Amino acid sequence: MNKRRAILIFIPFAWLLIFFAVPLFMAFKISLSHSVTAIPPYAPTFGLSEGWAGFKDALSRLTLDNYRFLISDSLYLKAYLSSVGVALKATILTLLVGYPMAYGMARATPQTRMVLLFLVILPFWTSFLVRIYSWIGILSNEGMLNQLFMFLGLTDGPIKMLNTPFAIYIGIIYAYLPFMVLPLYATLEKMDLSLNEAAMDLGCSRPKAFWLVTVPLSLPGIVAGCFLVFIPAIGEFVIPTLLGGSSKLMIGKVLFEEFFSNRDWPLAAAVAVVLLLLLVVPIVLFQRSQEFEQNKELQR
Amino acid sequence: MALLNDTSTQFSPWTDRSATPLIRFDGVTKRFGDFTAIDNLNLDIYPQEFFALLGPSGCGKTTMMRMLAGFETATEGEIWLNGAQIGDVPPNKRPVNMMFQSYALFPHLKVWDNIAFGLRRQGLPKNQIGPRVEEMLRLTRLEKFASRRPDQISGGQRQRVALARALAKAPKLLLLDEPLAALDKKLRQDTQFELMDIQERTGTTFVIVTHDQEEAMTVASRIAVMDHGKLVQVDTPDRIYEAPLSTYVADFIGDVNLVEGTVTAIDGESCTVAFAEGQPALNVISETRVEMGQRVFLALRPEKVCVGATAEKNTQNALTGTVTDIAYTGNVSTFHVTLASGHVIKAQASNGRRLSRRTINWNDRIVLSWTDTAGVLLKK
């Protein structure tokens, strides 16, 4: 029995080790190297050709210089902060757009529900890049939205929307909406409607019942959806590049430039590792606190 | 059963013409699309009544309750509560609270906060909420569980929390939607008496929806038997049982023999009914007005029919038949007796002797006997 369980656990574990832990470790190692004009563009490299002495020599040449540089140049700190800021705002906006959608879906008749669910997932069937490009066609000065505004006489000249932070938010909300809607829908759909009736029966108006019953009970969905949007949004590169232009400094773009334009792999790796820590540490802390709460309750 | 009827101070406001009802259904109809859930219904319910709506699923009893709570509005007609029309009053503005079938306890709140929920919405000051919640906890014997969450207590305790929460605001009317359906039989019986006790102590008017006739008989001061959105009969439990107005009610409440026959003689209140060739006509004294030659049903409860080798003394009816089935349920045995005409009559006898000493057995020829007042005549 135990042996079977060990084998069963080993398979996903091995998968994670090979395709997640090893590349991560390699990125971490590169972040401790320094940049050289060669292939690969960093040194030292580990090889077995020089034996144990060569390995020890390579190990001794690893430095924390890249991390020191990240701290010394305020550009990176600004990029991190502005990324977190953009991701935070975009997550809240996505929640505000996604919650009513999920709520409407959960309260629809079963047949309509399937159609709506299908519509939410439908954008995934086309390429992410194509969908972001098409937003250029909507938001640009000659774009559909501006033409519509001018046709309706709302403005005389085009409003600049492309290459502004506004376009970044539009892009992130659009692209990550399904990740917000689906977990929210899952929790809202399970919810017992008689709870709302009970709240109203005990003196709540409809909005009050929503606020005191529906919202707290859908909190797991809200948390899951927010994480699913916030985490990829921080490192988002395509949307700020294509829709935001140079209007907003974001860490994903910095990472891309260090890696491809400057060909400074070690610094790019350091940027990535810090980004990862920035994301992982709060999540771990959050989970710890939740486990703690649960244990506390079980002990009672 | 019918605990309320053996006291000298009988509680029966429905017989008092001067009594004002707490609830009045006045020609109420409720349609869902083409489906008529409630069909032109008139009903008065009086203060401090324990009123049961009884019927099979889909008969409209839950719709009636939801209209009282404010979750449904009547398509036609008016509903009055305490002398005011409540058709347009939203649920949160009604002096009515409901105990839901699923209990609908808020899973994210502790028992204490569940009970305090309604009081807080009422805007009651904090120093009044505490004592009121404590009072409710005492009433439902939940003091020890105040800081638990609903998923940390048993089904019976959850049921009591739901009751305490609904009673906390001291509503004029408490609605109970199948309140005991989720409990096992033993607990259900205990809880029935608890409910009656709490109803009496708080003096609140209770309206209970149930499909369990025994539950309705036990707790209610009056029962409304419903079928297809109509009230078939509204009466006290004993009247519903002893004097049903139709075969539907007689059949729905308890076990009954329905013998169809023709009236052959009438003498005042007593008449005779012939039901099969070769069988003696049955003597019945019944309030029901019948005519000569009319087709009628004799509704006869099995426990009012005696079984034995000979007819019991002072009985006016006797039929001979063969025992074809015996259902032994511990305290009573039900005998299925087949007559020569093919009719099967059920007779019930309490098991005063041990089973091994029972004198009647399968295939025995026995005599069924009952008095002329044992049954009632029904026209439909």
Image (tube, helix red, strand yellow):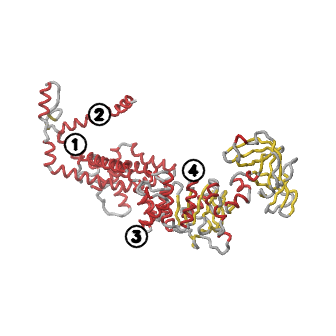
Q: Please count the marks in the image.
A: 4
Residue B233 is at least partly visible in this image: yes
Residue type pointed to by label 1: Val
Q: Residue at x 52, y 54 (%)?
A: B102
Residue mark closest to the camera, 1 vs 3: 3
Check disc 2 and report the residue beneath it: A17
User: SS at mark 1?
Assistant: helix
> For the residue carrying disc 1, how many other residues have a C-alpha within 10 Å: few (<14), some (14-19), or many (20+)?
some
In this rendering, the answer to whether B367 lies above or below B285 is above
User: SS at mark 2?
Assistant: helix
Chain letter for the residue marked with disc 2 in the picture: A
- Label 3 to label 2: alpha-carbon separation: 59 Å
Q: Residue at x 43, y 66 (%)?
A: B131
> For the residue carrying disc 2, how many other residues have a C-alpha within 10 Å: few (<14), some (14-19), or many (20+)?
few
Looking at the picture, do discs 2 and 4 lie on one chain?
A: no
Q: Residue at x 45, y 66 (%)?
A: B132
Q: Quadrant of residue B314?
A: bottom right
- Label 4 to label 3: alpha-carbon separation: 40 Å
Chain letter for the residue marked with disc 4 in the picture: B
Check disc 1 and report the residue beneath it: A273
Q: Residue B93: x percent and y percent?
A: 50, 68
Check disc 4 and report the residue beneath it: B186
